[in-house]
Image (spheres, rainbow, N blue to C red):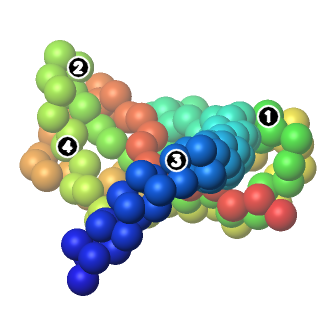
């Protein structure tokens, strides 16, 4: 069946080359415009998400021992945030492996954050793959940040 369609299209290119190439040009131009628009939308959405900062640090000065990680979410975007979710990774200094069990615990905050507002709270440690002598010496960071806007 597809060979019949290919033969018909090639025949039309041979019989009506100017019209077929003109139509092909219009089709390519329309496809490029749609692709460019979709690319711009994706780029603009990524820029807005990048304007939301999520940071984590071990802080017994701000938090207690049951929840020793201080989470800070800062909204530098021009939109209001309704939800932020993320995962925490933990590394020992000098090592590249992630000690936190992936997907075990997803952290989130449901506080509505207007533009240029900061929110901080304390959360518990992620479940670790193995025991660590000094948790305070681990380096914590954020991965898989997901932001929902109003």
**Residue in the foreground of this view, choosing between 149 and 102:** 149
The picture quadrant where one finds residue 146 is bottom right
Q: Alpha-carbon distance for marks 1 and 3? A: 54 Å
Identify the secondary structure beneath mark 2: loop
Q: Residues within 10 Å of mark 2 (few under 14, many from 20)?
A: few
* Sequence-wise first label, 3 or 4: 3
In x, y percent, where is residue 62? 61, 38
Gap between marks 4 and 1, in whole Å? 30 Å
Image coordinates of residue 132 in percent, x first then y, are 16, 40
Label 1 close to label 2 by CB (< 8 Å): no
Which residue does the numbered mark 1 point to in the structure image? Answer: 76
Any mark on residue 17, and which? 3
Upstream in sequence: badge 1 or badge 3: 3
Residue furthest to the top in view is 94
**Could you tell which of marks 4 and 2 lies nearer the N-terminus?**
2
**Which of the two discs, 1 and 2, labels the residue nearer the N terminus?**
1
Contact between marks 4 and 1 (CB within 8 A): the answer is no
Name the residue that disc number 4 marks.
99
Task: Determine the secondary structure under disc 3.
Answer: helix
Query: Which mark, by number, is residue 93?
Result: 2
Tell me the residue at 24%/83% (across/down).
1
Find the distance from the CA under tag 2 to the CA under tag 3: 66 Å
Q: Which residue is painted at 26% across and 56% down in the image?
A: 102
In percent of width and height, residue 51 lies at: 71, 34
Using residue 87 as the reference point, say whether residue 93 is left or right of it: left
Q: Nearer the viewer, residue 92 or 132?
A: 92
For discs 3 and 4, the disc positioned in front in the rendered view: 3
In front of the other: 139 or 19: 19
Percent x, y for residue 77? 81, 38
């Amino acid at each position: 069946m597809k060979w019949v369609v290919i033969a018909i299209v090639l025949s039309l290119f041979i019989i009506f080359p100017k019209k077929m190439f003109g139509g092909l040009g219009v089709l390519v131009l329309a496809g490029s415009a749609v692709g460019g628009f979709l690319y711009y939308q994706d780029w603009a959405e990524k820029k807005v998400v990048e304007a939301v900062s999520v940071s984590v640090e071990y802080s017994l000065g701000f938090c207690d021992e049951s929840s020793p990680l201080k989470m800070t979410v800062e909204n530098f975007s021009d939109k209001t945030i309704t939800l932020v979710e993320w995962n925490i990774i933990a590394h020992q200094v000098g090592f590249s492996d992630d000690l936190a069990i992936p997907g075990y615990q997803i952290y989130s905050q449901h506080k509505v954050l207007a533009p240029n507002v900061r929110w901080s709270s304390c959360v518990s440690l992620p479940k670790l793959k193995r025991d660590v002598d000094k948790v305070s010496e681990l380096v914590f960071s954020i991965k898989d940040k997901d932001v929902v806007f109003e």
